Amino acid sequence: MNEKNSEHELNRLRNQIDTIDSQLLSLINQRLEIGQKVGTIKKQTGSQILDRTRERKLIERLFKLNRGPAGKDLLRYVFNVIITATREIQKPKTISFLGPEASYTHVAALTHFKHSGKFVEQPNLYEIFREVEKNQSHFGVVPVENSIEGAVNHTLDLFADFDLNICAEHYEPVSHDLLSITGEAEDVQKIYSHPQALAQCKTWIKKKFAHAEIFETTSTSKAALLASDDKTIAAIAGKQAAHLYELQSIESKIEDYSGNITRFLVIGKEMPEPTGQDKTSIMFATSHVPGALFKALEPVNRAQLNMLKLESRPTRHHNWSYYFFLDIEGHKLDKRVADTIEEIKQYSLSLKILGSYPVFAKEAHEA
């Protein structure tokens, strides 16, 4: 086949793909419109929007119909996204995240909710909590700890101020790039990023850009936004920010340690039902007397529950008074967990159950 015929054949195949894409778009919208009608009937009859049995049977049916070359993993991914979108159009959810767009929190929110819902950026963590409390958003996604730098203290502090539940958790791998308009290291005079990102790259910065001024921002994407307007500014952010703000990468994977992961929490007013693989988060305060914390934690040991995390934060009401944040295995509706929490309460000045929710499992989340 000569070059002219090859070009003609390539154009013909591309036209076929364009036609199929148009048909797919029309069929997806048609499916969503039918899904809206189903949602209306469910609302009228009081039926649940979520029907896991129906969704599972749908996927199994498609597996049987499939003749390839699409594999099961591809079918499961594509139709899970479509099913989730159909479910959301029956009952659309609004999700608040720490903006601007392309922040790690935004990426975590998109991944957790499979790009379905209305995603609303907020300028700070307080506004995320506030929007959910006021029912302006169904859910909020907030960072709570990093595998290298530890707890995000401001998130923990806000749980003391708002009466919201933890509905889910999400773990997102984090890798940082140094981004700028030109992509040239010699143009960089200032480096902007979120305090956590700066801390995760501090050795690299000291080695490569000791001359640069360092500035903190409310998010990595905010740093990218600033960098997009000044060639002397570089931002430490993710690849998504580079695409959105049309920045060039000076260097990739600049974090001091590999395997960097951030844990995010989904906050809302719902309390998930037990799944058999759950954790419960509580916060409590003890008296500032010797042995108070030991006595409060002793019931966990007696019940032989796995303690997954323990963090402390000042209460800000009294000097040397602390809130303790405790994660234990199990759901609050499990008798052993419920009895243990009641015992902890006896040794506490105050106690709040923050939520019981499924333990994050990457494989299950992708399925």
Image (spheres, grey):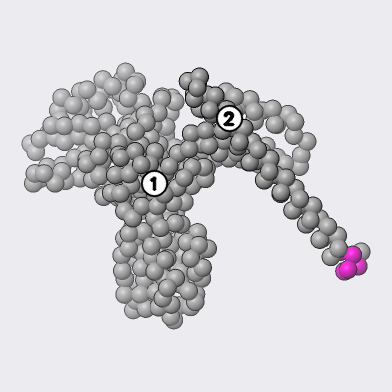
Q: Earlier in the sequence, mark 2 or mark 1?
A: 2
Q: Which residue lies furthest to the right in this view?
A: 1
x%, y% of residue 114? 52, 42
Q: In which quarter of the image is the C terminus?
A: top right
Distance from disc 2 to disc 1, alpha carbons, whole Å, reads 27 Å
Q: Quadrant of the N terminus?
A: bottom right
Q: In the image, is 194 to the left or to the right of 92?
A: left
Q: Which mark is residue 96?
A: 1
Please say if 197 is above or below 159.
below
Q: Main secondary structure of the magenta part?
A: helix
* Disc 2, SS: helix
Q: Residue furthest bottom?
A: 186
Q: Which of 13 and 137 is in front in this view?
A: 137
Report which residue position mark 2 lands on.
Answer: 37
Please say if 248 is above or below 259.
below
- Magenta region: 2-6
Q: Which of 237 and 10 is in front in this view?
A: 10
- Asked if residue 4 is among those painted magenta in the image, a careful observer would answer yes
Q: Is residue 272 visible?
A: yes
Q: Residue at x 36, y 46 (%)?
A: 142
Quarter residue 255 falls in: bottom left
Dot 1 crowding, Cα within 10 Å, few <14, some 14–19, many 20+: many
Q: Residue at x 90, y 65 (%)?
A: 5
Kindly identify the amino acid type of the residue bearing the numbered disc 2. Lys
The label nearer to you, 2 versus 1, is: 2
Please say if 117 is above or below 227.
above
Q: Nearer the viewer, residue 183 or 336?
A: 183
